[in-house]
Each structure stands twice: as structure tokens, then as C-alpha cells.
Image (tube, rainbow, N blue to C red):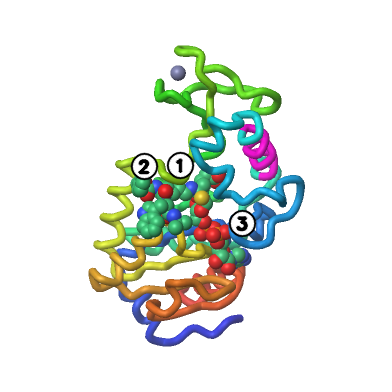
Amino acid sequence: MPEFPPSLLNALRSARRVAVLTGAGVSAESGVPTFREAQTGLWARYAPEELATPEAFRANPQRVWDWYAWRRGLVAAARPNPGHRALVGLAKRYSGFRLITQNVDGLHQRAGSRKVIELHGNIARVKCSEGCGPAECHDGAGRPPPCPRCGAWLRPDVVWFGESLPPAALAAAHQAAVECQVFLSVGTSALVYPAADLPIQAKGAGAVLVEVNREETPLTARADHVLRGPAGEILPALLERLS
Ligand code: BJW
Ligand code: ZN
């Protein structure tokens, strides 16, 4: 069982409003690959930055569609892990609990988290690449299907580099960050903006900033507490110490 500093436990025991930002690291123990760690498998040669852009989709819709089909399969086969479940337990402790995720895998919701703020969309949904809006797609394999309204390609309903985040989700995340008393940044490299700004805003507004990560990130130096290790072990242990 990891040791937790008494000042952290006190902050979490006395808080009413807690916000958590998660990244790919929280799903790593479910077998979903992260973005910036060693990539394995079919797509090892491609950097996510080369696939997760509107330009990449325009240049080669099939290649991007296949990458997402492969990832959709990984996510469908994955199960929530103890880290996801501990966040469900943590939510029950606080009247003001907000879970903000950069993940598109839906594993928080499958674990039982409600009202998850999804900053980067969801891989299970598709939308028109020309802006008609959401669409249905019953078979993600094969060729990218056409939009039923305008005939353009359908694309995953996720946020690519250079695209705006869903305004309502971003506004809710900002509000959660500046209102919380404790902010936990879990399993994210804290490199991608504007998500990476949320912990900084929280700290600027007076929150105790906690990082849970296997490795150092640009946020580490600014965190009040750094819990080094896998989220699937740290979060359940933290929840148990609070109970
Ligand atoms: C564990 C673990 C375990 C592993 N336990 N931990 C300001 C400054 C600089 C640049 C910008 C800026 N503002 C905007 C930008 C540009 C850009 C950006 O941030 N670039 C930087 C990379 C430099 N941002 C954007 O373009 C954003 N849009 C935007 O700002 O719009 C306004 C605008 C428009 C036009 C011009 C300018 C501004 C959009 C960003 C969209 C990101 N999209 C992706 C893909 C989503 C769809 C998909 O899934 O395919 O989102 S990229 C990818 O990165 C994905 C992730 O959500 C995101 C973050 O990654 P994450 O989750 O942190 O994963 P990793 O792999 O990086 O890290 C995993 C971590 O887990 C590691 O630290 C491990 O150690 C740890 N770990 N196992 C605990 N078991
Ligand atoms: Zn359309």
C-alpha cells in the first residue's frame, strides 16, 4: 500500500469540491495504448500527431479511418480497471465532484462514472467531416461511409490537433478547475493544450494540485503532491485511506 502525506489526506478529507483530469495513462492498465509512450502493433510507424489531424484525414481518409477502427476494437475489448472504479468511489465522497477526461474510450462511463466531461470527444461516435453534425454508423470496418445528408466522408467524433474543443465541455472543465479545492491530474503527459492548462488554472485559483503518474511531466514541478506509480494502484489505495 503506497504511503500518502498527511497534508494530502487532510486536504482530501476536508474538501467538498474535487476535480480530476484524466489522460490515456488511466486506461493503460485496461490495455488501451497511450499516445506518447512506445507504440506497438500495426501502426507503430505512425505518430499520432500524423493521424489525429484534419489534414491527415483529408489526405488519406481510409488510413485514418482504419487507425480508428483498430482502436475502436481495442476499446471494445477493454474493461474498466481499478483506477476507473476508484474514481467512481471518489465521486461518492464529494457533493462537488467533476471528472474531466481527455480520453475518447468511454471507460469511465462503463465503470459507472456519470456526467463525465469529455474534452476530446468519443471514439464510438461519428460525425460528418463537412460539419452536418452527428451521424449513425453501424459498421466501423471497411471504407469510411458517406454522410447521409451531404455525401462527404463520415469521421470519428473526436478532437484533432488544430480543432476547437467542444465549447460546453471546455467551459464546464474551466469552471470545475477554478472552483475545486483539490485538483488531481491522472495519467496525462500534460503536453496537449488547452487540457494541460486546467491544472495550472486550478492551482492559480487556490486548489491543492496532485499529480498521479508513472513518470515525470511538465506539471510535476508545479504539483503540491506527486504520487508516482500506476493509477490502477494509487487511486484505489488513496480511496481506501480516505474511507
Ligand atoms: C500512466 C500509466 C499508468 C502511463 N498510471 N500514469 C498552447 C501551447 C502549445 C500548443 C498549443 C497551445 N494551444 C493549442 C495548441 C496546439 C495543440 C497542442 O496542444 N499541441 C501540443 C502537443 C504542443 N492543441 C490543439 O490543437 C487543440 N485544439 C485547440 O487548441 O484548438 C484551438 C486552436 C485551434 C487552431 C489553432 C490553435 C488553437 C486540440 C488538441 C486535440 C488533441 N487530440 C488528441 C487525439 C484525440 C482523438 C484520438 O484519441 O485519436 O487527444 S491527441 C492525444 O493527446 C489525445 C489525448 O487526449 C491527448 C493527451 O494525451 P494524454 O492523455 O496525456 O496521453 P499521453 O500518451 O501523452 O500520456 C500518457 C501519460 O500517462 C504519460 O505521462 C505516462 O507516464 C502516463 N502513464 N501509464 C499512471 N498506469
Ligand atoms: Zn454531411
Q: CA distance from mark 2 to mark 3?
A: 22 Å
- Which segment is the magenta one? 65-74
Q: CA distance from mark 1 to mark 3?
A: 16 Å
How many marks can you see? 3
Q: Position of residue 150 (x, y in %)?
A: 46, 13
Name the residue rendered at 34%, 78% in the picture: 11
Name the residue rendered at 30%, 71% in the picture: 203
Q: Indicate which label's residue lies in the foreground, 2 or 3.
A: 2
Q: Which mark is residue 34?
A: 3
Question: Magenta includes 29?
Answer: no
Question: Magenta includes 72?
Answer: yes
Q: Quadrant of the N terminus?
A: bottom right
Position of residue 195 relative to residue 171, above or below, is below
Determine whether label 2 and label 1 are within 8 Å by CB: yes
Q: Which residue is mark 2?
A: 164
Position of residue 27 relative to residue 15, above or below, is above
Amino acid type, residue under disc 2 in the picture: Ser
Crowd tier of the residue under label 2, counting other residues whose Cα lies within 10 Å: few below 14, some 14–19, many 20 or above? few
Q: Earlier in the sequence, mark 1 or mark 3?
A: 3
Q: Which residue is mark 1?
A: 159
Name the residue rendered at 38%, 85% in the picture: 7
Q: Residue furthest front?
A: 59
Disc 1 residue lies near ligand 1 with CB under 8 A: yes
Q: Earlier in the sequence, mark 2 or mark 3?
A: 3
Crowd tier of the residue under label 1, counting other residues whose Cα lies within 10 Å: few below 14, some 14–19, many 20 or above? many
The secondary structure making up most of the magenta span is: helix
Position of residue 179 relative to residue 134, above or below, is below
Position of residue 2 relative to residue 108, above or below, is below
Disc 2 residue lies near ligand 1 with CB under 8 A: yes
- Where on the image, by quarter, is ligand 2? top left
Name the residue rendered at 33%, 48% in the picture: 170
